[in-house]
Amino acid sequence: MRAILINTGTELLLGDVQDAHLAFIAREILPLGLRIDERRTVPDSNVIRRTVTELFRRCEILFVTGGLGPTTDDITREMVAQSLGLELHQDAQLLAWLQQRLQLRGIKWSSGIARQADVLAGAQVLPNENGSAPGFYVKANINARVVSPHVFVLPGPPRELQPMFTKFAMPILKSIIEVPLPVERRSYSIAGVGESLVENAIGEKVLAIPGIELGYCARPGEVEVRIIGNPNAIRAADAVIRRELGVSIFSDNNEALEAVVVTLLKERKETLATAESCTGGLIANQITNVSGASEVFLAGYVTYANSAKSDVLNVDSKLIDKHGAVSEAVARAMAEGARGRAASTYGLATTGIAGPTGGSDEKPVGTVYIALASGDSEIVAKKFLFSTDRETFKQLAAQAALDLLRRRLLR
Amino acid sequence: MRAILINTGTELLLGDVQDAHLAFIAREILPLGLRIDERRTVPDSNVIRRTVTELFRRCEILFVTGGLGPTTDDITREMVAQSLGLELHQDAQLLAWLQQRLQLRGIKWSSGIARQADVLAGAQVLPNENGSAPGFYVKANINARVVSPHVFVLPGPPRELQPMFTKFAMPILKSIIEVPLPVERRSYSIAGVGESLVENAIGEKVLAIPGIELGYCARPGEVEVRIIGNPNAIRAADAVIRRELGVSIFSDNNEALEAVVVTLLKERKETLATAESCTGGLIANQITNVSGASEVFLAGYVTYANSAKSDVLNVDSKLIDKHGAVSEAVARAMAEGARGRAASTYGLATTGIAGPTGGSDEKPVGTVYIALASGDSEIVAKKFLFSTDRETFKQLAAQAALDLLRRRLLR
């Protein structure tokens, strides 16, 4: 079955907002053997109608997102109705629910809001448990005046679309698919090895397996390898990938590196404190994005000023004078200082030059020292050079630090 | 002139990576009076060829991104060549440059890498100063066997595409456009006011101005209002928006809230320290994303454990016992503690319940207290309830904290 996604929204085409629906929906439907064959992004105009109609004969499942809200530029409901040749009528039950919802929140009623109670004739309403605009499902129509695929119309905000999709659209999709194809997908997240080296290690060997599809995707500080194929091919490829990449694989289920680290710390009943200079709190922020991080993460010290390094982390100011704040000696002292201050099992520290200014011949922009202190062994320190923009530098340094800790936790 | 963007990449359609090119290119070309009329995302297959060919008659400018790398799934170069009916030939100069580049980096040569020296006959090479795959520009061809628009083929990684686009594609686009249409665009970033209230304040008044296009976009903790139109209409709409929204507008040039705060602190020659519990370092991370933040940001204390709140921030443990770690009293003590410890002008603190666990009837998940301490006036504290997922909660709390500080800095 062919599936196509249409994202509506002038704000997407103007670059004001980035779409998150494609990634979400694609991952949800893959276990059904379904893929998004194509995605189109169109403005809030009658291009929506033209595009919906054009795609009727090119797919069996059509997802349309966005443009269901209360403002005047929200016209997707009307455009889809026109494409399908269906009337819109106000649903009394939805209207009452909307009125109640707004009253509870103390929001003033307006005529735009009432449009969200308009329902396509014959459509199934997909309740919105996190917002006011409901979604719709219109069954494929192959004998009617307008031949059309299964159409799902979904709200724009990710926090409304995602739970609606999982709870209400997925059961419908499962009933449409009936017997999913025996296709599996696996992905492996790899840290500490570049994309070319990953391909050198596994590329030829995996592609020699009949029926396997292999892809790579590089993100700051990690490479994702994905394989798609029938269960036998997947089993063979999985063995090759695990043999060749071993401990460099940190997840086979799309977990973030920080989530893996939190899980390992929990298992070992150990704790962490961070001392960040150049990463400026990014490591702490990533770790505290993981639910339950409070069990293992005691404190983070973002010691941007040198005085803070000395004051909070007890780094000897003479050490800073002698070696500079960006140095292996200071990274080591910061790691040990954080561990001591928080009384944690591990102290993880970064100090470097994020740029764009502050570099020198000896220590160019992109230089970073990472150190890991633990009670029962020597402090480990590593130097990296990440010559890139400021934000990517921070991401690369944070990933390198988390990976240093992860490898230590596997011992 | 109509412009269309094609993003190639199976990884995009599988949800492994999210596209950033649409947003970047759209913002770059708008000052030329150009917009992306439609965006298509297609897999690394011969759908690329079909799509490129299909769009030849529907636009005057075509951007194609991704699939220029060294791995076997990188086939965009070949697909575009076939669509345009042009030969590919190896460029000796590019090949030598590639060999030198890899040698410098100690990367082993492979046959896949050599494909990156293949050039479309008649195309202009767009040098890649941040990677190995060059881009291409093929001039519009209206009298040839294959009628085609201006075609730009660009590499997939944003850190390669973006500088290439700015430095090499933009000058070509400027020469194509010649006389840009007198269309202007402005956007206003608003904090502390919800989307509906923003529309209530300005919607009718702005839409009453002839020739204005108005749009809204809500992101966690902020609303963006954009207007597009001729210079006269823009001037009239600008006056309405500024009058109605006033100090709630924190930027009219897409600056992030944290960048505005850093600029204000620099102007006032004042400094900041943060004390974060529930936001877990997000505020520090955002602030240190701003280049030059080190001038004003002294230290961040991510005091996740109660012991860290007492130890580093000097919060009386009795206060925590009496009111709980999530309380106005503790938020105030944290703000003052951070200010004292770092000897900064301001101390900004957050304490709350990010969830999904840890809530109670009295203090449900989503509760957060934010406090701001400054030397010359009382500590200000505010309570919010952000009932949402963990990461959105952190974003909303960080935005609310930064906005509290911003409004204080305007005094």
Image: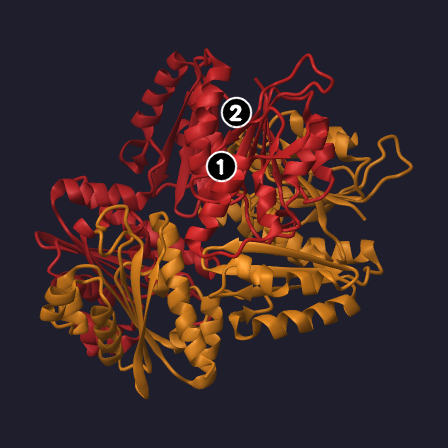
Chain colours: A red, B orange
User: Which quadrant, please, contains the N terminus of chain A?
Assistant: top right
- The vertical placement of B340 against B312, above or below, is below
Between B395 and A324, the residue placed more toward the observer is B395
Q: Are marks 1 and 2 on the same chain?
A: yes
Residue B78 picture location, percent across and down? 67, 30
Which residue in the protein does label 2 denote? A35
Residue A112 picture location, percent across and down? 61, 49
Residue furthest right in the image: B143
Query: Along the polypeptide, which appears first: circle 1 or circle 2?
Result: 1
Amino acid type assigned to the residue bearing label 1 in the image: Ala
Residue B71's label in the rendered image is none
Residue B76 picture location, percent across and down? 64, 33
Mark 2 residue crowding within 10 angstroms, few (<14) / some (14–19) / many (20+): many
Which residue in the protein does label 1 denote? A23
Per the model, the C-alpha gap separating discs 1 and 2 is: 11 Å
Looking at the image, can residue B94 be seen? yes
Query: What residue is at 19 percent from the left and 70 percent from the top?
Result: A313
Between A363 and B10, the residue placed more toward the observer is B10
- The vertical placement of A246 against A180, above or below, is below
Say which chain tag 2 marks. Answer: A
Residue B99 picture location, percent across and down? 55, 43
Disc 1 on helix, strand or loop? helix
